Amino acid sequence: MSDVVRNVFKTLIKVPVIIMIFYLIFNLFSFTICYVKMLGLSYVAMQVAVENNYIPENERAILEKYMETNIESEVLKDVSFTPDTKFTKGQYGEPVKVGVQARYVFVWPLMTSEQIEGSFTSGSEIQFSGRYKSESELEALRKKKEENEKTNIVIEYEVPGLRYYPDLD
């Protein structure tokens, strides 16, 4: 009988560990795919900046539309240019700073107390009562968590602008 109980507890311990390992593998795989997408986007932005010595308005609009439609997803949020990216025309041949940034949202299993609302009591000798958070409280917590998260994928370059013959000294 004790072997059966031992096997049950081993199985009960293995299940959450296996679930967390699968979530970890999913997050690593998903982060890698998102990073490669951001790297490709940064190369395109870098090429535009090298050709023009800045990112022109029409190119910026095209790249931002591409960010919204093809790069942003449920796990990759707030895809944008870095604040130091140069959008104004400058002297040909000067270095140009250009970059992209995004926030990766890690996916983890939620605790039941974070998912539902209602109240619960314990039926054992130890009296314990409490309540789950309401939908508005949960939404406020989620918003606060999103606001506190920092941008965690930043790819930025300082590239030399092309120097054309009329601008040579």
Image (spheres, rainbow, N blue to C red):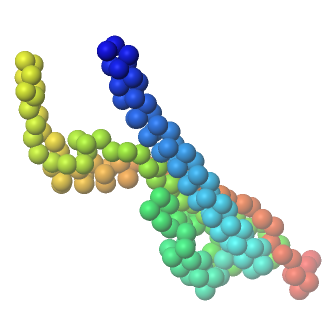
Could you say where residue 65 lies in the image, as x and y percent from the top left? 53, 79
Question: For this view, does 85 lie left or right of residue 93?
Answer: left
Residue under the point 17% across and 45% down: 133
Q: Residue furthest front?
A: 1
Figure label count: 0
Residue under the point 63% across and 75% down: 87
Residue 136 at least partly seen? yes
Name the quadrant of the N terminus: top left
Residue 64 at least partly seen? no
Residue under the point 70% across and 73% down: 44
The quarter of the picture where residue 136 lies is bottom left
Residue under the point 37% across and 45% down: 109
Q: From this view, report whether residue 15 is shown above or below residue 118.
A: above
Question: For this view, does 74 lie left or right of residue 112?
Answer: right
Q: From this view, report whether residue 5 is shown above or below residue 142.
A: above
Could you say where residue 166 lies in the image, as x and y percent from the top left? 89, 86
Question: For this view, does 109 lie left or right of residue 101?
Answer: left
Question: For this view, does 124 lie left or right of residue 135?
Answer: left
Seen from the viewer's position, the closer of residues 145 and 13 is 13
Q: Residue furthest top?
A: 2
The quarter of the picture where residue 127 lies is top left
Seen from the viewer's position, the closer of residues 56 and 28 is 28
Seen from the viewer's position, the closer of residues 166 and 78 is 78
Seen from the viewer's position, the closer of residues 141 and 84 is 141
Could you say where residue 163 lies in the image, as x and y percent from the top left? 86, 77
Could you say where residue 54 lies in the image, as x and y percent from the top left? 70, 75
Name the quadrant of the C terminus: bottom right
Q: From this view, report whether residue 115 is shown above or below residue 67.
A: above
